[in-house]
Image (spheres, helix red, strand yellow):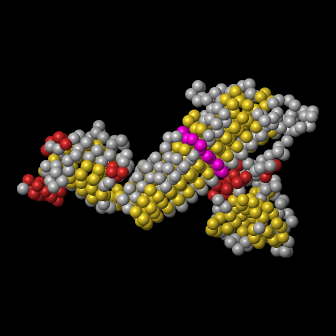
Amino acid sequence: MRKAIGLFAVLFLVIFGWAQERGPIMIRGDADFTPENGVIAGTGTPEDPFLIAGWTVRVSKDSPFGIYLANTTKAFVLRGCVVIGAQDPNGAAIVLENVQNGVVEDCLVRESINGIAIQASRNLALRDNFLGVSGLGLQVLGTTLEHYQHVIEPTTTVNGKPVYYFFGIEDTVLTDLDAGNIVIAGAKNVVLRGAKIDQTDGITVAFSQNVRIEAADISRPRGNGITILSSPGTSVRDSPRIANSKNAGIAVILSDNVRVENCGIYANLVGIYVNASDNFLAQNNAFAAGPVGVHITGASREPIVRKSLFYQNSYGVKLESALGPTVEACSFWQGDIAIFLDKNVRYARVAQNSIVAYGYGVSNFGSEGLIELNHITRANIGIIFEEAYQEAFPTGNIVRQNVIYRSYDGFYFGRESRDTQIYENLVWQCQRWARDFGQNVWAPYGRGNWYSNYTGPDADGDGIGDDPIDFTGGGRDPAPLLSRDFFTKLPGVLGTMEIRTVVLADEAGNTLRLPVLIADEAHERFIGFMGIPPELGEDLAILFAFDTPTVSQFHMQNVFLPLEIVFFGADGSFLGRNLMKPDTQDRYGAASPFLTALEVPEGRLSPLGRAIRLLGLE
């Protein structure tokens, strides 16, 4: 009888809009299920749960929540309540913390930042709730699989879009979900394809295995775009937009063997955040804007960031705590620090990256790392081991075969740096070659570095200058090299490109075979001739190849030699040709969509007439 009377009262209040208004409800344990805390019926058993229903809760400015239930074991139902004005960004309209066997249904949240926050709870059911929020609509947090064992129906919505909550599914393909929130928990071998998030919550994969997210379109999520928690083998790929996240575009936490490939990750607080996750791989991604492109921490083992482009990120790749990380074959343009290695980084390899227009190209506090074959242009300092003020002692690193061009300082080694081996680098047209305040080893194998304006004598003709170079701070290169002929590799990303031969013909039938670098990946097309010294670029040619015909334009910023560009259609037909002036703001394109474009130093196509066809590749 008590239960029947209670239900009738709730229906009467909800239907006729006469729900009573009150302040926040706070239940901190089973003993707090009382009428004073909004309970109108029930005994707390599964058959007769405590009923909290029909209330309108106006949240005061000094309260972080409207309804708060924590540390309970009794069954409960929260029904037909309205929560208004939960404006604490660290709180929520409804908080369920360490509770179980509860139901939340027919509730409305409005004029609030966050909607429902579920923390370390079990066996909850949510249905028919409307969450109108400016922050996170629904947040489920936990440290074990059972903390995600809930039934949440898509009739619960975030800003009008359904919540899709999947627990325990296997061997399933989910397609084209336009969602307010997506959670995949306790799952195996699941594909999420074509999901769309716009100004709502993001996607969460928790305590799952081998989940693949592909072709996602995520814009302006209120937290992370994608959260991967304790879910080894998860992959995110072929997603052209993961953008404008309040936090991370993709957050990887306690999840080994995660892969992120071929994604556009733009204007997030952090593009990809990796914490305590081994064997992480990010490749063929595009990062732009935002404070940090990739942030790796938590002693993650052997993470790899490769073949990606970074544009206008303050930090491109930030390695805070990692063992054996690799950053290779990436293109960076415009920012503060392209690659940062903190004191808890060991055995890093930073190799074959192209870095243009950064404050610091590579900044290192780590130890026993290898920095090689990078190409750094127009940096304030090309490679720096910053002053650590006794808080870090970078030791045993190797810095070799890097090209530092048109930068203010080539190298800076701070007072705590020890036993850094520095040799066979090209320091080219820099205002200062180096400063070394540490205890480092220049020319450890008898060969130092090449400096573009060094002209010391060479009495024995061995190619090593007889006059050592003394740097500010006390460092000395005892064996400066007089020629750069030893440096036969292309630096940076150019050294990773495939080499082919193009066959060209003009209208008169004249042909020309020309060795070219193939730029058919985004990071290769992004860097092109940027930053290359003219002396290295004068014998190069680059064929830019696209997957489908495009109308892209080419620029010449940070390109230091005049180029010609020829545009070709999908059949190799001639679509246009331009002479491009070095280091200008001008842009160059074709009137029609083109599939390939050939850039060569001015004059290399002189054996042919103006209209040129691309006959093929050898």
In this orientation, which residue lies closer to the viewer: 221 or 326? Answer: 326
Q: Residue at x 75, y 68 (%)?
A: 617
Q: Quadrant of residue 59?
A: top left
**Was residue 26 drawn as part of the magenta stretch in this picture?**
no
Position in image of residue 378 (x %, y %): 70, 42
- For residue 499, side relative to residue 552 (left or right): right
Position in image of residue 375 (x %, y %): 71, 46
- State the predominant SS element of the stretch in magenta: strand
Q: Quadrant of residue 285?
A: bottom right
**Magenta part of the protein: which range?**
320-330
**Was residue 322 drawn as part of the magenta stretch in this picture?**
yes
In this orientation, which residue lies closer to the viewer: 302 or 17? Answer: 302
Q: Quadrant of residue 341?
A: top right
Position in image of residue 108 (x %, y %): 26, 54
Where is 294 relative to 176, above or below? above
Q: Residue at x 54, y 49 (%)?
A: 279
Q: Residue at x 27, y 59 (%)?
A: 128
Residue with the most extreme left position: 1
In this orientation, which residue lies closer to the viewer: 335 or 224? Answer: 224
* Quarter of the image where the C terminus is located: bottom right
Position in image of residue 122 (x %, y %): 29, 50
Where is 374 relative to 568, above or below? above
- For residue 347, side relative to residue 539 (left or right): left
Residue 11 in sight: yes
Residue 599 in sight: no
